[in-house]
Amino acid sequence: MGLQDTFKAAAQTIFTALGDVKISVTYRIRTMGYSPATGRTSPSDTDYAITNCIRIDYRADEIDGVAVKPKDFKLMIPVDDLTPTPEVDHFILIDSVIHNVVSFEKDPADAVWTIQVRA
């Protein structure tokens, strides 16, 4: 097992140990499909259930009103628990409320995604 695999396994262990601190979310990718029969486009959603997720609110000194707005928050998700690579046009559903992915980054060990989310 390489160093990256070790970090990924450690991240999974940490998330598992957090127990009831974790939340479940749905990661949604929406694509527009075209129907030649009707001549119309319509949205199609692909959802990914994520049960190993931690919500972290931004500190007051991180909120600048532009890049980080007052109701923004971060989600930390183990890389192995999120199949698609995040994109800014994707969505996160928490308790049926849709939030936008604003930004995302992976830690240097490629073990955890940190995703900025906006309502």
Image: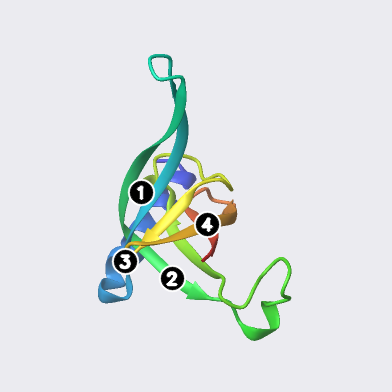
Q: CA distance from mark 1 to mark 2?
A: 15 Å
The amino acid at mark 3 is Asp
Task: Return the x and y of residue 103 as percentages of the image width and height.
Answer: 61, 55
Q: Mark number for residue 95?
A: 3
Q: CA distance from mark 3 to mark 2?
A: 13 Å
CB atoms of marks 1 and 3 within 8 Å? no
Give whichever of discs 3 and 2 has the lower sequence position: 2
The amino acid at mark 2 is Arg
Give whichever of discs 1 and 2 has the lower sequence position: 2
Q: Residue beneath label 4, please?
A: 100
Q: CA distance from mark 4 to mark 3?
A: 14 Å
Q: Residue beneath label 1, please?
A: 81
Q: Mark number for residue 55?
A: 2
Residue drawn at 46 percent across, 62 percent down: 76
State the residue lying farthest toward the bottom: 60
Q: Nearer the viewer, residue 93 or 53?
A: 93
Please determine whether, in this image, residue 84 is positioned above or below residue 49: above
CB atoms of marks 2 and 4 within 8 Å? no
What SS does tag 2 mark? strand
Q: Nearer the viewer, mark 1 or mark 2?
A: 2
| Quarter occupied by residue 1 | top left
What SS does tag 4 mark? strand
CB atoms of marks 1 and 2 within 8 Å? no
Left-right relation of 101 to 55: right
What SS does tag 1 mark? helix
Left-right relation of 19 to 77: left
What SS does tag 3 mark? loop
| Quarter occupied by residue 61 | bottom right
The amino acid at mark 4 is Asn
CB atoms of marks 4 and 1 within 8 Å? no
Give whichever of discs 1 and 3 has the lower sequence position: 1
Q: CA distance from mark 4 to mark 1?
A: 19 Å
